[in-house]
Image (cartoon, rainbow, N blue to C red):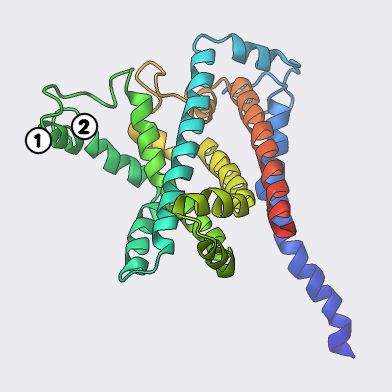
Amino acid sequence: MKLAHQRPMFDIAMLGVPLVFLVLICAVPVVYTVVMSFQSVDMFTIMSLRRPFVGLHNYMALFARPGARHIFLNTALFTILSVSAQLVLGFALALFFNRRFPGAATLRGVFLAGWIMPGLVVGGIWKWIFAGDNGVLNAVLAGLHLTRSHPFWLSDPALSLYAVIVANIWLGIPFNMILLSVGLAAVPADVYEAAKMDGAGPVRTFLFITLPMMRATIAAVASLGVIFTLQQYDLISGLTEGGPSNSSNVAQYWSWQLSFQVYEIGQGSALAVLMLAFTAAVAGFYVWSTRQEQAA
């Protein structure tokens, strides 16, 4: 009887601890950031709770800043190209490893090595690859007689964003491959056997069986790819720090620069709130796609 009486208290404690943790670590910073986006906040007023209310001024000033349009376009390009390439290459690798052959598990583990490395470490590796004078990429291109010059991939404004995108694609491929491999494993084998008996080739099987049955999984993986790409800060910090001249800068890194480099914290918070709203919309689409997957 005593144990039965103590059980509700134990359940409340087990539920309350993570709930308090979520409120303190997630909810309070989010609400505080939203509040700061409507206030005039700089390095002299950051410690005060009584700050001038400025309404939508931070949002309007953010869009009026020189370079804002360029950074938003960079963010769209960075996200679209990264997620598209990660999805296509991750799907190709998932299909490849879905075929049974010796060493498949080992090779899959090698591909996963890139995913478990921190973004700063990946940035350091790709910085060495993209180095202009003695970089690996330029050495390979020169060895294949594909170029006579040494492009400066990270310091050339025309190339720096695409160099960061390539590194981010490499970082995200293993995650896409694993999730899509799980989706492929859930496709019933008898469906493929029936298609084979009907004379369907590999292309028709892929187009009319694999893709339709993977539709919900692909939508979920794409949604997660957008969310993770919009969170990508440390890779940009390790490679270009948004430069040169904002040529590789994106919204998430710009928000940090506004808040902690030039201390225009109100505008940095406004940008963070805009990204939060967009990410929440994508997360909502992800939840919808997973429900569709479960219903299928």
Q: Amino acid at mark 1?
A: Gly
Q: Which residue is mark 1?
A: 143
Of 190 and 211, which appears nearest the observer?
190
Q: What's the distance in space between the residues labelled 2 and 1, CA to CA?
A: 16 Å
Q: Which residue is mark 2?
A: 131
For image coordinates 72% across by 50% down, the residue present is 23
Residue 36 lies left or right of residue 124; in this view the side is right
Residue 222 lies left or right of residue 164; in this view the side is right
Measured as percent of width and height from the top left, residue 60 is found at 67, 12
Q: Is residue 223 above or below residue 42?
A: below
Depth-wise, is mark 2 or mark 1 nearer the camera? 1
- Residues under numbered marks 2 and 1 in contact, where contact means CB atoms less than 8 Å apart: no
Measured as percent of width and height from the top left, residue 144 is found at 12, 35
> Badge 1: few (under 14), some or many (20 or more) residues near its Cα, within 10 Å?
few
Ranked by sequence position, the earlier of labels 2 and 1 is: 2
Is residue 47 in view from this perspective? no
Measured as percent of width and height from the top left, residue 67 is found at 49, 12
Q: Amino acid at mark 2?
A: Ala
Which numbered marker is on residue 171?
A: none
For image coordinates 36% across by 63% down, the residue present is 109
Can you say which quadrant of the picture contains the N terminus? bottom right
